[in-house]
């Protein structure tokens, strides 16, 4: 028995005797009992998982819909599923010391539930488009794009399933999301509920060290889009005391919420600076309708990006020097875009490559090296997905406006330029709680502070045609971590859109390399 459990047992006995010990608003005894993982409460399932190395039949233990807090607000969301392989391809495996993939299925900052999942990889955000494996959205629910529908050139990819087929443990947490309302119309899943829930789920895993399968020192988070943003935030903000009051309120276990590694696909993050970044990046691109975004708004925001970027004080990699609004296009081409094009072109059959290059004459390609200009790349991408401002809309209609809702207020402004433009009041100020909410939702601040509880291993990916946010959001996240000396594997997928995951097998291998836990099959 480990020390932690000894301490808990002593605490349990003491609180039963005294009947008064308090723990996160409920008694220590209740919390300890409620949050103990029952190793025997599984069903055994079998699934065939397609991997790069062929189909694998995996027999695994499945623990379903376990509440991860003692005092849930909505247990349909604050529950997690655990899957642990016992045999892969007919060969017995022991996953008791395996890495734990902590795969969230948040999309669009919407609620995500695993309560109805019938096995590994079955979670989904409420409101995920029909036919993509998500639950049926409630009538009138907003349908968000992307979510956990990760795609490899049209084929669905599940990190959770691939991790299981590699012999890892998979934990899939649900989390509250921005659209949830109670009977009085109070929004109870707005910021920071989702990150608080994910942290509580990590604490639950740690609290159950020795009972839950897997190595609790090797928790590797993954997520896409809003889920990618939350995965990055989980990695950056490990053990930050700022979340303690929120965690205590829901009866989270008293344990570390730091994680080992963070995998972040197309993270929709740094929200309070994303409008500026978006116009710097996609400002000149027309909307899909062919109409231009409001150029007055766009130019003002793009100009403001200059000071924002300078203020970050980031250095580009390989001795690039300070990253600025003036050189960021070149930096992206050199560091991410040309290498992405090269990977893409090298993998094409010669005839397809020749045809692609003939259609895309802006690319010069010789001896495996691609070159092109940033302005030509922008023309190549074409339509921008969002109007201006992209995130803090004047009419409060974006998902992010809802994310920063409060009480019975569905949506609020979270940036001064939008608030002031929308109200016509040049002296208007954001609601007093907004700065703290922004801080709790943004990994960049925790990285800028070199938060010591942060993950040290990072996997960051985005498609080059993904205009759900600015490519600088990914560039800055990666650069900030690289500047701290963390282990960062950041790449882009050429011509890929939102939700792309084109090297999932490499991610699984990266987990093995980072932990030193070799694939078991
Ligand atoms: C997602 C997409 C967005 O464009 C956004 O602003 C927030 C979230 C998503 O797919 O999760």
Image: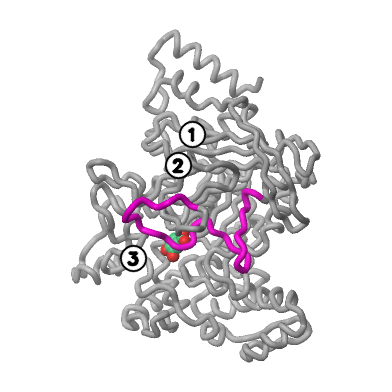
Residue ID for mark 3? 392
| Secondary structure under the numbered disc 1 in the rendered image | loop
Would residue 446 be seen by someone viewing this image from the given angle? Answer: no
Q: Percent from the top left, x then y, of residue 448?
A: 51, 56
Q: CA distance from mark 1 to mark 3?
A: 33 Å
Q: Is residue 277 left or right of residue 183?
A: right
Q: Percent from the top left, x then y, of residue 443?
A: 49, 55
Q: CA distance from mark 2 to mark 1?
A: 9 Å
Q: Percent from the top left, x then y, of residue 496?
A: 58, 71
**Residue 250 lies in quadrant:** top left
Which contiguous range is marked in magenta?
Answer: 134-161
Residue ID for mark 2? 197
Q: Is residue 4 above or below residue 77?
A: above
| C-beta proximity under 8 Å, tags 2 and 1 | yes
| C-beta proximity under 8 Å, tags 1 and 3 | no
Q: Is residue 510 above or below residue 476?
A: above
Task: Pick whichever, 97 or 355, lies toward us.
Answer: 355
At 50% from the left edge and 11% from the top edge, which residue is drawn? 13
């Amino acid at each position: 028995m480990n020390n932690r459990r000894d301490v808990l047992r002593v605490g349990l006995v003491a609180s039963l005797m005294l009947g008064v010990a308090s723990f996160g608003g409920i008694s220590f005894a209740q919390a300890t009992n409620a949050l103990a993982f029952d190793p025997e409460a599984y069903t055994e399932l079998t699934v065939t998982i397609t991997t790069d190395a062929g189909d694998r039949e995996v027999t695994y233990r499945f623990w379903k819909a376990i509440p991860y807090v003692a005092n849930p607000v909505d247990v349909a969301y604050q529950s997690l599923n655990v899957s642990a392989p016992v045999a892969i391809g007919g060969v017995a495996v022991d996953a008791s010391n395996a890495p734990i993939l902590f795969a969230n299925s948040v999309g669009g900052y919407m609620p995500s539930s695993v309560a109805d999942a019938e096995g590994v990889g079955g979670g989904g955000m409420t409101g995920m488009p029909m036919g993509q494996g998500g639950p049926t959205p409630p009538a009138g629910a907003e349908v968000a794009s992307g979510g956990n529908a990760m795609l490899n050139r049209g084929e669905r990819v599940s990190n959770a399933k691939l991790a299981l087929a590699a012999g890892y443990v998979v934990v899939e947490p649900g989390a509250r999301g921005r659209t949830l309302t109670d009977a009085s119309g109070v929004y109870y899943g707005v910021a920071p509920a989702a990150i608080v829930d994910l942290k509580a789920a990590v604490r639950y895993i740690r609290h159950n060290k020795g009972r839950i399968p897997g190595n609790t020192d090797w928790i590797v988070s993954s997520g896409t889009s809003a889920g990618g943003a939350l995965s990055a935030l989980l990695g950056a903000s490990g053990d930050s005391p700022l979340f303690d009051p929120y965690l205590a309120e829901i009866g989270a276990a008293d344990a570390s919420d730091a994680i080992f590694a963070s995998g972040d696909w197309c993270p929709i993050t740094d929200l309070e600076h994303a409008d500026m970044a978006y116009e710097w990046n996609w400002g000149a691109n027309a909307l899909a309708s062919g109409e231009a975004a409001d150029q007055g708004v766009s130019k003002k925001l793009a100009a403001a990006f200059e000071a924002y970027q300078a203020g970050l004080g980031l250095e580009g990699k390989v001795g690039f020097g300070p990253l600025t609004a003036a050189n960021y296009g070149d930096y992206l081409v050199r560091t991410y875009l040309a290498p992405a094009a090269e990977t893409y072109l090298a993998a094409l059959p010669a005839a397809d490559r020749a045809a692609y290059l003939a259609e895309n004459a802006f690319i010069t390609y010789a001896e495996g090296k691609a070159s092109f200009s940033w302005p030509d790349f922008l023309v190549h991408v074409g339509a921008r997905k969002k109007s201006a401002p992209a995130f803090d809309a004047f009419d409060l209609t974006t998902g992010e406006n809802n994310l920063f809702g409060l009480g019975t207020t569905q949506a609020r402004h979270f940036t001064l330029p939008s608030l002031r433009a929308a109200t016509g009041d040049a002296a208007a100020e954001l609601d007093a709680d907004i700065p703290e909410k922004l801080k709790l939702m943004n990994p960049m601040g925790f990285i800028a502070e070199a938060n010591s509880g942060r993950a040290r291993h990072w996997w960051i990916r985005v498609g080059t045609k993904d205009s759900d946010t600015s490519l600088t959001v990914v560039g800055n996240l990666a650069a900030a971590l690289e500047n701290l000396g963390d282990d960062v594997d950041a790449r882009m997928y050429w011509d890929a859109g939102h939700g792309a995951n084109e090297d999932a097998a490499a991610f699984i291998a990266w987990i093995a390399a980072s932990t030193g836990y070799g694939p078991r099959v």
